[in-house]
Image: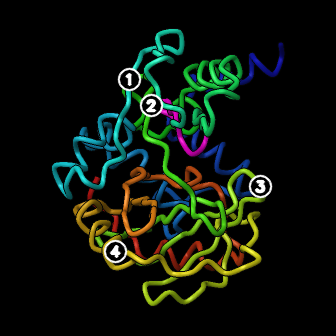
Amino acid sequence: MKNGLIVRVLRLLPDKLYLSLKYRKHLGCWPNWKNPKTFSEKLQWLKLYDRRPEYTQMVDKYAVKDYVANIIGSEYVIPTLGVWDKPEDIEWDKLPNQFVLKTTHGGGSEGVVICRDKANFNKESAIAKLNESLRTDLYEIWREWPYKNVPKRIIAEKYLEPNSNTHDLADYKYFCFNGEPKYIQVISGRGKKMCIDFFDLEWNHQPFHEPKDYPFAEEEPTKPIQFELMVSLSRKLSSYKPFSRIDFYEVGNKVYFGEITFFPTSGMGGFNPTEWDSIFGDLIQLPNK
C-alpha cells in the first residue's frame, strides 16, 4: 500500500522534476538541464522540449504504417491482419496459423505475443499479457511525451519467419543523428539469451554495451544482406529529427520496417564503458526550445 501511494504521488510531479529523480535513480547522478552533454542527458532534454505533434503517429505501431508507406513505400511495411480495441474483440478464427499480436502504444517486447502454432497457442496467457500492456502508460512511467496520446489498441501482424540456420529473427536498429545513421545495434537471441552488439557503418564491431548490462553475442552477428538498403531507408525516415532509432528486420532478401524509437531504454540504460555516453551525446544537435 505504501509503495503504491509513493508511485501515485511521484506520477503527479511535473515532468522535469520526475525525470530528474528517475535519472538519479537509474544513473546515479543528476541530469544537467542547462547544458546537457551526454546521450542520456540529451534524450531527457528532448522529452521536455522537442514535442512535435507528428511524433505521436511515429510511435503508434498501427498509425506509423501509413507514415512509413508514404515515405519509403508500403512494400517495407509488415502486413496488418487486424486491429482491435481490446483482447476480447480479437477475431481468433480469422487469424492464420502463425501471427504476431502487439499493443500499439507499447515499448520494446512488452505487449508483444508471438503465435508460431495456433493449435498449441495459449490464448488465455496472451489475453492476460495484452491486458497488462493496455494498463501500462509509457508516458506516465518514463515521461516519453510522444506516447501520451497514442490510442491503446491491439494489432495482429504477419509472422516473420526467423533465419533457417539460427532460428533467430535479429533486429537491426539504426541510431540516427540529425538524419544520419551512425551506429547499428543488433539484437539477437530473443527468447533464449538476448545479446546486443553495435557496429559502425563499415560493420566494425564496437567495444561498448548499451544498455550496459547486456552481453555481446557469442558468435558475432554477420552483416545483413540488405545493409546498404537499410542505411538508405533509415536516412529517409530519420530526416529532420535530432535523434531517432529506425528498426528493421531482414527475412531472406526482404527488408521490413519494425518501429521508430526516440528514447532507447528511455535514455536511462547506461553505457559501458561510460565514455560512450558522451561520444553519442556529441552526435546530437539539440534544436532551439
- Identity, as a three-letter code, of the amino acid under mark 4: Val
Q: CA distance from mark 3 to mark 1?
A: 29 Å
- Numbered mark located on residue 83 in the image: 1
**At numbered mark 3, what does the secondary structure look like: helix, strand or loop?**
loop
Q: Tell me what residue is drawn at x 51 percent, y 18 percent.
A: 92
In this rendering, the label closer to the viewer, 4 or 1 = 1
Query: The magenta stretch spans which residues?
Result: 100-109
Q: Considering depth in this image, is 172 or 22 the residue closer to the camera?
A: 172
Among the two numbered marks 3 and 1 on one chain, the one whose residue lies closer to the N terminus: 1
Cβ–Cβ under 8 Å for marks 4 and 1: no
Q: CA distance from mark 2 to mark 1?
A: 6 Å
Q: Considering depth in this image, is 188 or 215 the residue closer to the camera?
A: 188
Which secondary structure is most common in the magenta stretch? loop
**Within the magenta stretch, is there residue 6?**
no
Q: Considering depth in this image, is 278 or 135 the residue closer to the camera?
A: 135
Q: CA distance from mark 3 to mark 2?
A: 23 Å
Q: Which residue is mark 3?
A: 192
Cβ–Cβ under 8 Å for marks 2 and 1: yes
**At numbered mark 4, what does the secondary structure look like: helix, strand or loop?**
helix
Q: Which residue is mark 4?
A: 231
189 to 200, vertically: above or below:
above
